[in-house]
Image (cartoon, grey):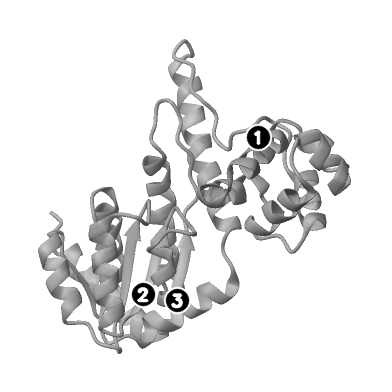
């Protein structure tokens, strides 16, 4: 099922003032809007028909008809993908909302994936001489988690926590290498500097970001978008980290399946080595 709320969240930054006005109307009246003609909607929302058409295309729909279908499929439960937490609620009720928010982030993210991007990403990873994982701040945790996972494969993977060491590693990349770069905003100047070095060296770039139209996204050979929304008690980046980690886990799983027996041997050797560290 298409997720209108997820598409809106991913593309919000590129919308004009009038398009944001339309978005607010659609979020408040999605079921009503799904039955309106484009002219009726433009009148009800106080925007032009051109704005409605442009809005639909900016969200990735072919035309207004596609937007109408998505609105009709969307759940009728308010404007937000993620529920706010009431400080007067019980701990169990709060916990339920935290889990629900993470589940929603994952569902919205998987709905944004496409088969071509996944296939391309896996082919690039399997064909790479080296795979470098880069991330700054919270995204560095995601990169480290990816390194921990990809060490279980036959692929040559590298990771550095220090930004200067990341710059040095990126400088050594070639057209035979792949960099996986994680940045929630896609606008961090240090992340952009890393991406530009990778691009200049001819390395292929897989970008994981929360902004599909960011400066970083424009440099990507493959773009994977993590969908999240900020709430009063939790930043957007924290929701996004769950989705980013899962996207990396997805890449690991898809590539591992393709490595076959060679991958199985490496995994068995890893398990044997780690097993020897445990007390008998």
The quadrant of the picture occupied by the C terminus is: bottom left
Looking at marks 2 and 3 on the same chain, the residue that comes earlier in the sequence is marked by 3
Q: Nearer the viewer, mark 2 or mark 3?
A: 2
Tell me how far mark 2 sits from mark 3, CA to CA: 9 Å
* Residue 61 appears left or right of 198: right
The dot on residue 24 is: 1
Q: Residues within 10 Å of mark 3 (few under 14, many from 20)?
A: many
Q: Residues within 10 Å of mark 1 (few under 14, many from 20)?
A: some
The dot on residue 121 is: 3
Q: Please say if the residues under marks 2 and 3 sit with CB atoms less than 8 Å apart.
A: no
Tell me how far mark 2 sits from mark 1, CA to CA: 35 Å
Image coords of residue 143 (percent x, y):
28, 60
Q: Is residue 51 visible?
A: yes
Image coords of residue 157 (percent x, y):
24, 75
Callout 2: SS: strand
The residue pinned by badge 2 equals 205
Q: Does 137 sit above or below residue 261?
A: above
Q: Residue at x 38, y 51 (%)?
A: 185
Looking at marks 1 and 3 on the same chain, the residue that comes earlier in the sequence is marked by 1
Q: Residue at x 56, y 57 (%)?
A: 110
Callout 1: SS: helix
Tell me how far mark 1 sits from mark 3, CA to CA: 35 Å
Q: Is residue 148 visible?
A: no
How many marks the image carries: the answer is 3
């Amino acid at each position: 099922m298409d997720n209108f709320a997820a598409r809106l969240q991913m593309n919000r930054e590129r919308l004009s003032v009038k398009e944001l006005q339309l978005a607010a109307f659609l979020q408040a009246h999605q079921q009503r809007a799904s039955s309106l003609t484009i002219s009726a909607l433009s009148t009800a929302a106080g925007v032009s028909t051109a704005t409605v058409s442009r809005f639909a295309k900016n969200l990735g729909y072919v035309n207004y008809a596609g937007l109408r279908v998505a609105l009709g499929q969307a759940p009728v439960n308010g404007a937000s993908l993620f529920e706010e937490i009431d400080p007067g609620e019980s701990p169990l009720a709060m916990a339920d909302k935290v889990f629900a928010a993470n589940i929603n982030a994952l569902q919205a993210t998987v709905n944004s994936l496409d088969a071509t991007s996944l296939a391309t990403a896996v082919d690039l990873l399997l064909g790479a001489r080296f795979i470098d994982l880069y991330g700054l701040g919270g995204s560095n945790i995601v990169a480290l988690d990816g390194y921990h996972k990809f060490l279980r494969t036959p692929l040559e993977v590298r990771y550095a926590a220090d930004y200067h060491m990341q710059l040095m590693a990126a400088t050594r990349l070639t057209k035979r290498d792949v960099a996986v770069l994680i940045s929630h905003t896609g606008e961090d100047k240090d992340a952009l500097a890393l991406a530009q070095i990778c691009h200049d060296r001819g390395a292929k770039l897989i970008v994981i970001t929360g902004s599909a139209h960011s400066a970083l996204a424009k440099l990507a050979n493959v773009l994977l978008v993590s969908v999240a929304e900020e709430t009063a008690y939790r930043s957007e980046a924290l929701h996004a980290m769950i989705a980013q980690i899962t996207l990396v886990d997805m890449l690991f799983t898809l590539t591992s399946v393709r490595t076959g027996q060679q991958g199985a041997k490496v995994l068995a050797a890893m398990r044997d080595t780690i097993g020897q560290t445990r007390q008998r």
